[in-house]
Structure formats: structure tokens, C-alpha cells
Image (cartoon, rainbow, N blue to C red):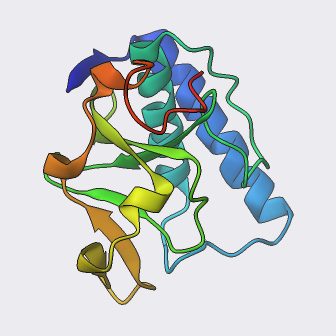
Amino acid sequence: MVSVTLTPQEMMMAAYAGTRRAIASIQKGRQPAYGCTEIWGTHIEGAAGEMAFAKAAGIYWDAAFDTFSKPDVGSFQVRTRSRSDYELLVRQCDADDERFVLVTGTMPEFSVRGWILGADAKQERWLRTHGGRPPAYFVPHSELQPIEKIFDPTVARLSKAG
């Protein structure tokens, strides 16, 4: 696990990116997906989690929006969860060949917990339905690869190292 504290300037940048994403969704008439009901905080904290991962990994974060199927940071999909005990959420429709990173926390303090390949996350034993939302895979922290190994070329199945 890697701890990250965003600076006030980084928080402002993440808040702007999240707000821009929320407004773009409203303008295009998009409804929140997967049973989500809160749009502003979800976009803002999600963007902050992406920034925290980028900072920890030393990867440029472009704060892109309207890029739903593209990776969030470099070649990584970042999933931000507000509580430290929450698991990594991977959906059935997520790409099997992409790496999913779990970031927990809220601004300004985040923890980059680890990662797993999409195909490896989709195990029946982790399939759950929470809060009336569609089924998804909830990968426990203990099953995630350490974040320190994310760029290690000796780790199996890391063909997309970025």
C-alpha cells in the first residue's frame, strides 16, 4: 500500500476535472450508471483518486473526460472507494486485459491498495450485489497485487506495463 496526500493545488485540479465530468454528463442527458444516485461527489472523488494513483506511480494524469472505455491513468483503470475497508469493484462488462487499481480514501488522503487484471478479478466467489445495484465483483485487498509490483516486468501477465 502507498499513502498519498494531495496538495491544495492537486485537490483543486481534481475537483475541476470531476466537476467538468459531471457537467458534461448533465449536458448530454446521461443518467448515472450502475444504480449510482450521487453525481457530483462521485465524479470529484473519482478524479481525485485517479490523481492520487498517478502521483504515486509517477504517471502523467490528463484529467480526460468523455473517455468511458479508455483507461483512466496511463494504461490503468482506477477505482476509487471512500472507505479503507471497501473492496475493489470490477464490473462484468469491464475489460479482461486491463489492470484495475484500488484507491481508497477521500480528499486529501488516499491509499493506493493494489491492482488486479480484469480477467483475474472476475471470479464467481467475488460476485455480489450491494445496495440494490447490479452485480459486480468485489475483490478483497488480500487478493490484490502490491502496488509496488505494478511495473515489475517479472510479474506474470503484465504485457501492458506503462
As displayed, is residue 75 above or below residue 142? above
- Quick one: 44 or 131, which is closer to the camera? 131
- Count all numbered tags in the image, as a single digit: 0
115 in relation to 123, above or below: above
Left or right: 79 as drawn, with respect to 123: right
Q: Which residue appears at 39% of the width and 58% of the height?
A: 120
Question: Compared with residue 84, is residue 86 higher up or lower down, i.e. above or below?
Answer: below
| Placement of 125 over or under 58, stated as above or below | below
Question: Farthest residue in the bottom direction?
Answer: 132
Query: How far across and how far down the image is residue 40, in percent?
Result: 54, 54
Q: Is residue 83 visible?
A: no
Task: State which quarter of the image contains the C terminus.
Answer: top right
Picture quarter containing residue 18?
A: top right
- At 50% from the left and 11% from the top, the residue drawn is 9
> Looking at the rendering, which quadrant does residue 153 occupy?
top left
Residue 136: name its quadrant.
bottom left
Q: Quadrant of the N terminus?
A: top left
Residue at 58% x, 63% y is: 94
**Left/right of residue 53 with respect to residue 81 in the rendered view:** right
Question: In this view of the protein, can residue 133 be seen by the observer?
Answer: yes
Q: Name the residue at the right extreme.
A: 28
Residue at the spot x=79%, y=49% of the render? 66
- Judging depth in this view, the residue of 48 and 111 nearest the camera is 111
Residue 76 position within the rendered picture, expressed as x and y whole percent measured from the top left: 55, 36
- The image position of residue 146, as x and y in percent, is 25, 30
Q: Is residue 25 left or right of residue 57?
A: right
